[in-house]
Image (spheres, grey):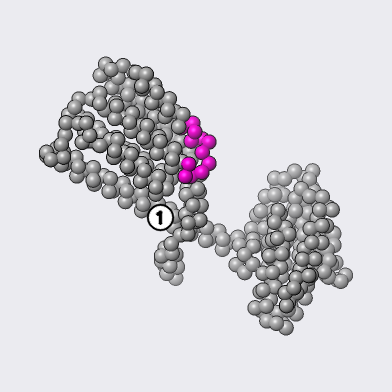
């Protein structure tokens, strides 16, 4: 069964929005790795530059300082980048600068050694790009810049037609093909894993019928708010129950009951958009309100009751609500228990209303 589901998911093309979300997620997770790669690249370039400058007696020129400064500035800018596509552009600039810098260093080597070192530099840059969180266009840009700048047949004494040139060309083609295949294959696997992760999280924390958070999500999110928001601010918890829901199911069937649940969830979502809300199970919902005044809570509950009461749907319903102020020493479960008692009072005093504990 699992293999069948996995095969079906792998056949589905990821929508553009999901691919964009994956690219952003991948970049945020690997931001420090990118910074480390940039720093290591600068160090190696500087080391080679110093070796060639000293042993080759060329000296560390002002041009070297300019390249070094540019690479350092680009690395600093990386710390302020927030969008993945911005990183694609920044990385292309970094590769262009360091590739030109490498080319200038290699010009200081003996002519017969230059093609080999150009191939080594090309392979290093392509490998580094293949493990970076780049988009497809960003990676292709790196490949193009690397090929153009570190071309071992450009301004060297080697020709494609001679034996040495043919061997270099074959190796370059093999290396490039392998790196490009590795990048796209790895990206496909990472996108698939991200899709599966999203699917599992959605199934674990989103109610499949109403498409709002479920009890597990509510306990996690509300518990986090309870633990992090200052207790000097008022916290309230509401338990919401659909009135006469069993009669709706008995009279009209479970399909209509499901529609009622969806409409109620949509109304809660519309009114309580700035707060934590969830379907706890059955016809019960919960809302956690932090940093609000009691008068604001009353206004929100009034609006929710009114919205459901005047709904022109053929099968209108009302809700009963139990509210409690979350005290300093209350846990989330204790607050739920208090709100449930207040809900009981609303149910037995006329319904279509809210009651404070």
Image position, residue 2 (x, y; %): 44, 67
Label 1 sits on residue: 189
Q: Residue at x 51, y 43 (%)?
A: 83
Magenta segment boundaries in residue numbering: 75-86
Query: 97 left or right of 16?
Result: left
Image position, residue 346 (x, y; %): 84, 67
Q: Residue at x 83, y 66 (%)?
A: 353
Count of numbered tags: 1
Picture quadrant of residue 213: bottom right
Picture quadrant of residue 342: bottom right
Q: Is residue 318 above or below residue 24?
A: below
Q: Is residue 138 above or below residue 255?
A: above
Query: 99 left or right of 254?
Result: left
- Viewer-side residue, 306 vs 57: 306
Q: Residue at x 16, y 40 (%)?
A: 160
Whether 74 is among the magenta residues is no
Image position, residue 14 (x, y; %): 45, 59
**Quadrant that contains the C terminus:** bottom right
Image position, residue 148 (x, y; %): 29, 38
- Viewer-side residue, 68 vs 214: 68
Query: 23 left or right of 96?
Result: right
Q: Secondary structure at mark 1?
A: helix
């Amino acid at each position: 069964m699992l293999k069948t589901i996995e095969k079906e998911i792998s056949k589905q093309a990821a929508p553009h929005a999901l691919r964009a979300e994956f690219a952003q997620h991948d970049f945020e997770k690997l931001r420090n790795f990118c910074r480390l790669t940039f720093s290591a690249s600068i160090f190696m370039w500087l080391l080679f530059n110093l070796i060639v400058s000293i042993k080759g007696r060329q000296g560390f020129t002002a041009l070297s300082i300019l390249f070094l400064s540019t690479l350092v500035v680009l690395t600093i800018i990386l710390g302020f980048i927030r969008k993945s596509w911005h990183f694609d552009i920044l990385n292309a600039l970094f590769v262009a600068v360091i590739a030109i810098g490498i080319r200038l260093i290699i010009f200081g080597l003996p002519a017969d050694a230059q093609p080999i070192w150009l191939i080594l530099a090309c392979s290093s840059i392509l490998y580094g790009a293949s493990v970076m969180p780049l988009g497809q266009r960003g990676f292709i840009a790196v490949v193009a810049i690397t090929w153009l700048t570190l071309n071992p047949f450009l301004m060297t004494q080697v020709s494609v037609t001679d034996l040495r040139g043919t061997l270099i060309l074959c190796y370059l083609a093999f290396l490039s093909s392998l790196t490009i295949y590795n990048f796209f294959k790895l990206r496909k696997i990472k996108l698939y894993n991200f899709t599966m992760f999203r699917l599992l999280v959605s199934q674990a924390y989103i109610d499949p019928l109403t498409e709002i958070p479920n009890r597990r999500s509510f306990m996690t999110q509300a518990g986090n708010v309870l633990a992090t928001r200052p207790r000097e601010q008022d916290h309230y918890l509401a338990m919401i129950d659909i009135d006469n829901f069993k009669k709706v199911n008995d009279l009209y069937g479970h399909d209509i009951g499901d529609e009622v649940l969806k409409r109620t969830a949509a109304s809660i979502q519309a009114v309580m958009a700035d707060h934590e809300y969830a379907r706890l199970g059955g016809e019960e919902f919960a809302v956690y309100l932090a940093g609000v005044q009691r008068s604001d809570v009353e206004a929100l509950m009034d609006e929710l009751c009114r919205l459901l009461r005047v709904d022109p749907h053929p099968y209108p319903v009302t809700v009963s609500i139990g509210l409690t102020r979350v005290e300093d020493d209350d846990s989330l479960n204790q607050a739920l228990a208090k709100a449930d008692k207040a809900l009981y009072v609303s149910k037995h005093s006329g319904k279509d209303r809210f009651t404070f504990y």
